[in-house]
Amino acid sequence: MRRSTLNSTFQAGIVGTAFLLACASAKAVPYTENLGENDPAGTFAGPGGSSPPLSMGVTADNSPISGQSVGGHATLTYALSNNGGNQMVPGDVRIFEDAAHTILSDVLRFEDWGVGYVYVYSAKDDGVTKLADTGMPTAFQANVVDFTEQLNGGAYGLFGYTPTAGQPGYSTYLFDGSTSAGLNYAYNFTSDEPAGVPDGGTTIGLLGLGLIGIFAYGRKPAASAA
């Protein structure tokens, strides 16, 4: 979904993005899961062969484990394949449009049953229908973390989310079948493309000054003959 956002929010998003990406890089997270609000497949980066997040399209949020599908409904679903031995931590990652966390934009719901799943919920408020634009769950899991939406390279979302032990999406299971207590997974989630970042009239002002300068130059009087 999309909406108007203040310059301060864009700036905060850029700073937050740089910080998260720097942290992820410093921690040398081996696996990166790339998800999207309308992604037909999802992508994966890391060692040990290919185990990409597999988009299952829109499926029912109906975990057999009590409390995980609370308030949920059918929405975009990814099979993460990082839940060997039920080692992925369940919970909801909530992404807000504003720094005050009053406008909920997206929810990434991690559930630790089967191969491990994430259900993507997104608000329906921009007139554009995407796979995850099914509205928000009416309740949340007990394990919740909140973030402010970021702007990164022309896209909005949450980038470089690297859960620590106990946070939603954390897992000690590696794709080669072994386990590790380290920071093993980072998640990039793309919500949508920006409609354009407002510049407060700076560009128009500079253009106006330039036109004035050109006009003044053209009206410069000719030098008097000696």
Image (tube, grey):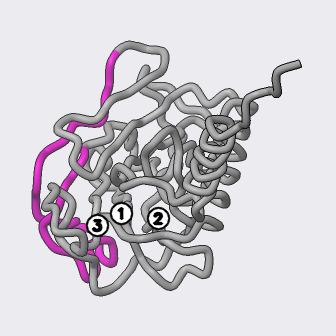
Q: Secondary structure at mark 1?
A: strand
Name which quarter of the figure residue 99 lies in: bottom right
**Magenta part, dominant SS:** loop
Q: Earlier in the sequence, mark 3 or mark 1?
A: 1
Residue 138 in percent (x, y) is at 28, 86
Q: Nearer the viewer, residue 86 or 8?
A: 8
The amino acid type, in three-letter code, at marker 2 is Val
Residue for badge 2: 93
The amino acid type, in three-letter code, at marker 1 is Arg
- Is 137 included in the stretch rendered in magenta? no
Tell me, yes or no, if residue 104 can be seen here.
Answer: yes
- Is 58 included in the stretch rendered in magenta? yes
Q: Is residue 126 left or right of residue 142?
A: left
Tell me, yes or no, if residue 164 can be seen here.
Answer: no
Q: Earlier in the sequence, mark 3 or mark 2?
A: 2
Q: CA distance from mark 3 to mark 1?
A: 11 Å
Residue 109 badge: 1
- The residue at 33%/65% (across/down) is 2
Mark nearest the camera among 3 and 2 is 3
- The residue at 60%/43% (across/down) is 215
Range covered by the magenta-colored residues: 50-78
Residue 28 in percent (x, y) is at 68, 27
